């Protein structure tokens, strides 16, 4: 069993190494989650120390670096899945947001034509049934950029529809 005081000492002595591991292995777009990764790293380490799983074959810093690396990779994969799920939901919502009496294919094409080029390219591929990752690769832009263009493009389409209703 490890005391709270001993564990606090370990955290103080190793936090630079853990942060280094996280920054090295967590994609920059997920840096907002650094605190979560560090916390999960120390929770896993604490549990292992409680169970006596740390054998001491390696230095404590090496062991914690490995845990932090693995946590960074695990959480990045989790965040990737969450992003993909959000995009699938947004794609579905986009297609469902067109009411039955809403724009037909010609009106939709006209709205896409009114968009700036960077949005037009994303929506053309989206309407061909391509997923965010495929659009990202085809256009050579990050997936996050594709997602933000889908979001902003949907807002443009709503404004275009409102303009059509009002005038």
Image (tube, rainbow, N blue to C red):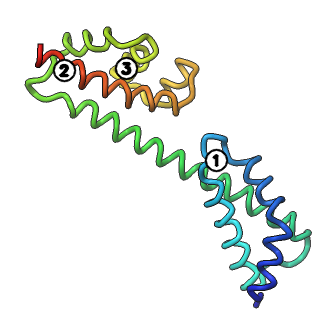
Along the polypeptide, which appears first: circle 1 or circle 3? 1
- In the image, what residue occupies the spot 33% across and 21% down? 127
Residue 83 placement, left or right of 167: right
- In the image, what residue occupies the spot 64% across and 47% down? 31
- Near mark 2 (Cα within 10 A), the count class, few <14, some 14-19 or many ≥20, is some
> 106 above or below 51?
above
Label 1, label 2: how many angstroms apart (C-alpha)?
A: 37 Å
Q: Between tags 2 and 3, which lies in front?
A: 2
Tag shown at residue 136: none
Q: Are marks 1 and 2 in contact (CB under 8 Å)?
A: no
Q: Between tags 1 and 3, which lies in front?
A: 1
Q: To which quarter of the image does residue 56 belong?
A: bottom right
- Which sits in the foreground, 158 or 68? 158
Q: Are marks 1 and 3 in contact (CB under 8 Å)?
A: no
Residue 64 placement, left or right of 39: right
- In the image, what residue occupies the spot 71% across and 58% down? 70
> 124 above or below 131?
above
Residue 8 placement, left or right of 149: right
Measured as percent of width and height from the top left, residue 158 is found at 24, 25
Along the polypeptide, which appears first: circle 2 or circle 3? 3
Q: Which residue is mark 2?
A: 161
Callout 3 secondary element: helix
Tally of marks:
3
Tag shown at residue 123: 3
Measured as percent of width and height from the top left, residue 88 is found at 37, 39
Callout 2 secondary element: helix
- Which sits in the foreground, 125 or 119? 119
Q: Which residue is mark 1?
A: 31
Callout 1 secondary element: helix
- Near mark 1 (Cα within 10 A), the count class, few <14, some 14-19 or many ≥20, is some
Label 1, label 3: how many angstroms apart (C-alpha)?
A: 28 Å
């Amino acid at each position: 069993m490890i005391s709270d005081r001993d564990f606090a000492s370990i955290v103080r002595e190793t936090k630079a190494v853990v942060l280094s591991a996280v920054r090295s292995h967590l994609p920059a777009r997920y840096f907002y989650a650094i605190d979560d990764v560090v916390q999960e790293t120390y929770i896993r380490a604490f549990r292992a120390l409680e169970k006596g799983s740390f054998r001491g074959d390696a230095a404590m810093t090496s062991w914690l670096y490995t845990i932090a690396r693995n946590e960074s990779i695990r959480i990045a994969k989790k965040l990737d899945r969450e992003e993909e799920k959000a995009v699938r939901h947004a794609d579905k919502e986009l297609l469902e947001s067109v009411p039955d009496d809403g724009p037909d294919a010609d009106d939709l094409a006209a709205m896409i034509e009114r968009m700036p080029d960077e949005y037009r390219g994303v929506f053309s591929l989206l309407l061909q049934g391509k997923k965010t990752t495929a659009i990202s690769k085809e256009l050579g832009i990050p997936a996050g950029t594709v997602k933000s263009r889908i979001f902003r493009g949907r807002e443009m389409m709503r404004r275009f529809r409102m303009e059509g209703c009002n005038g």
